[in-house]
Amino acid sequence: MARNFLGILLILAAIGAAIFWTNPLWISLGEMRGEKAALESAVKRFQELKKVRDDILTAYNAISPADLARLEELLPKSEHIGTLLINVEKLSGDSGVSLKQIDIQSSTREESAYTPPREAGEGPGGAPSPVRGYTTLPLSFSVNGSYNAFRSFLGAVEKNLRLIDVETISFNASEKGNYDFSLTAAAYWYKGQP
């Protein structure tokens, strides 16, 4: 009987030792399975993002050079003051008004270019934050001409590819039925992501 008791005691001791030594390994194995699932999920998400990136690159590469040049003119990557001066002078000449004076100041204002559509869980309370990607270039200029020529000039500024916001307009009557028009405006240029 003592032999049986000793045998049972040794078997129970072996089971206890096995549980004692393998329990931490079993817990560690469970944690590793969780980490493996998280890593597989991250790899899947990276593959999805890579596909989106490839699709965007394909779409970007499909844009013709002429369209890229138009985009560069719409929102240039720097102030391009010389091009802006030439552009305003051409618009005034084509419209029948004479450009008397132009003053371009250094860029100082930073604007919010785009507010993305609201999506659930985006930001605190789901509220999106504005993306800052452009800066304004304040300018003021004076032109002289008839009212109809000035209207034509404003239409040309409106249809111009370079974004120019006219902020204020003032005028004074001058000789021969012409007017002196003074405008303050802002041109935009892309400054990149914050």
Image (cartoon, rainbow, N blue to C red):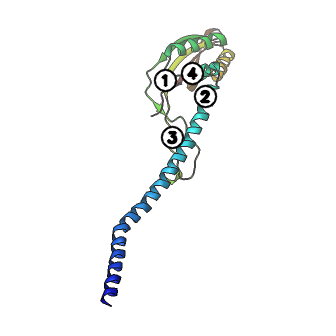
* Mark 2 or mark 1, earlier in chain: 2
* Mark 2 or mark 4, earlier in chain: 2
Residue 77 vertical placement versus 24 (above, below): above
Tell which of 181 and 49 is nearer to you: 49
Nearer the viewer's eye, disc 2 or disc 1? Answer: 2
* Mark 2 or mark 3, earlier in chain: 2
Badge 2 element: helix
The disc placed on residue 90 is: none
Q: Is 14 positioned to the left or the right of 113 in the image? A: left
Q: Is 136 positioned to the left or the right of 147 in the image? A: left
Q: What residue would you read off at disc 2?
A: 60
Q: Residue at x 58, y 14 (%)?
A: 87
Q: Is 189 positioned to the left or the right of 106 in the image? A: right
x and y percentages locating residue 6 in the rendered image: 31, 84
Q: What residue would you read off at disc 1?
A: 138
Tell which of 172 and 194 is nearer to you: 194
Identify which amino acid the numbered label 2 is placed on: Tyr
Q: What residue would you read off at disc 3?
A: 130
Nearer the viewer's eye, disc 1 or disc 4? Answer: 4
Q: Report which quarter residue 116 is drawn in.
A: top right
Q: Are marks 1 and 4 in contact (CB under 8 Å)?
A: no
Q: Residue at x 57, y 52 (%)?
A: 120
Identify which amino acid the numbered label 4 is placed on: Glu
Q: Residue at x 53, y 17 (%)?
A: 141
Q: What residue would you read off at disc 4?
A: 72
